[in-house]
Image (cartoon, rainbow, N blue to C red):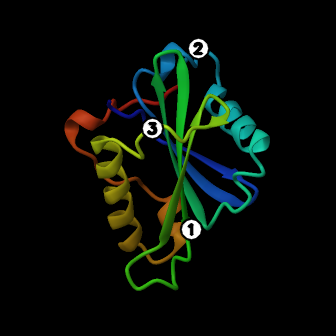
Amino acid sequence: MPFYNPIKLTIQETPVLVYPCGGVEALLSREEKGIIERYILKLYAENKNILASLGEYNIIILWNEGKDVMADIWIYDKLESWGSGPLVDVKIFRNFNIEKNIGVSAGDGLILLGKEEEHRRSKNSLAEYINGDRPELLEDMVLKEDFN
């Protein structure tokens, strides 16, 4: 599923990059400005107990499965303390509820996360990485447009 241009947010002082997938517009209207941002803020607010530790930054892949909005929240932490890169955890949500009966990612998601990690390592700081340009993805993985 190709991705719309990412959306940058800050939640509880944690930088968050949201990659909406093509298809999610069937559930979250592109006509409604800021709908992705509101959805993500509500998701975090309703799941404070599950998302108690947000790490140093998050990448969210927002997609749909039938009539359900799915959010894979990748939590990156301990950027400088691991020689092999950050410690990464994922929490998957179906609508606003934790989902434990589904796979962790799809191929496009893994490619996206790998490209983001390569890109982060090429920057001098987390702020430069978050606030700068995004990595180039494979041609068939991008829609080259904003969600709204």
State the residue position of label 1: 127
Q: What amino acid is labelled 1 in the image? A: Ala
Spatial CA span between label 2 and label 3: 30 Å
Q: What amino acid is labelled 3 in the image? A: Ile
Quadrant (top left/top right/bottom left/bottom right) for the N terminus? top left
Q: Nearer the viewer, mark 2 or mark 3?
A: 3
In-front residue for pair 53/25? 53
Q: What amino acid is labelled 2 in the image? A: Glu
Q: Secondary structure at mark 2?
A: loop
Quadrant (top left/top right/bottom left/bottom right) for the C terminus? top right
Residue 79 percent across, percent down from the top left: 51, 76
State the residue position of label 3: 102
State the residue position of label 2: 31
Q: How many marks?
A: 3
In-front residue for pair 82/137? 82
Which disc number belongs to residue 35?
A: none
Q: Eyeballing the image, is 77 above or below 100?
A: below
* Residue pictured at 42% horizontal, 31% vertical: 21
Residue 62 percent across, percent down from the top left: 50, 35
* Residue pictured at 47% horizontal, 59% vertical: 132
Residue 135 percent across, percent down from the top left: 34, 54
Spatial CA span between label 3 and label 1: 33 Å
Q: Nearer the viewer, mark 3 or mark 1?
A: 3
Residue 121 percent across, percent down from the top left: 38, 73
Q: Secondary structure at mark 3?
A: loop
Question: N-terminal of the two: label 3 or label 1?
Answer: 3
Mark 1 is surrounded, within 10 Å at the Cα level, by few (under 14), some (14 to 19) or many (20 or more) other residues, namely few
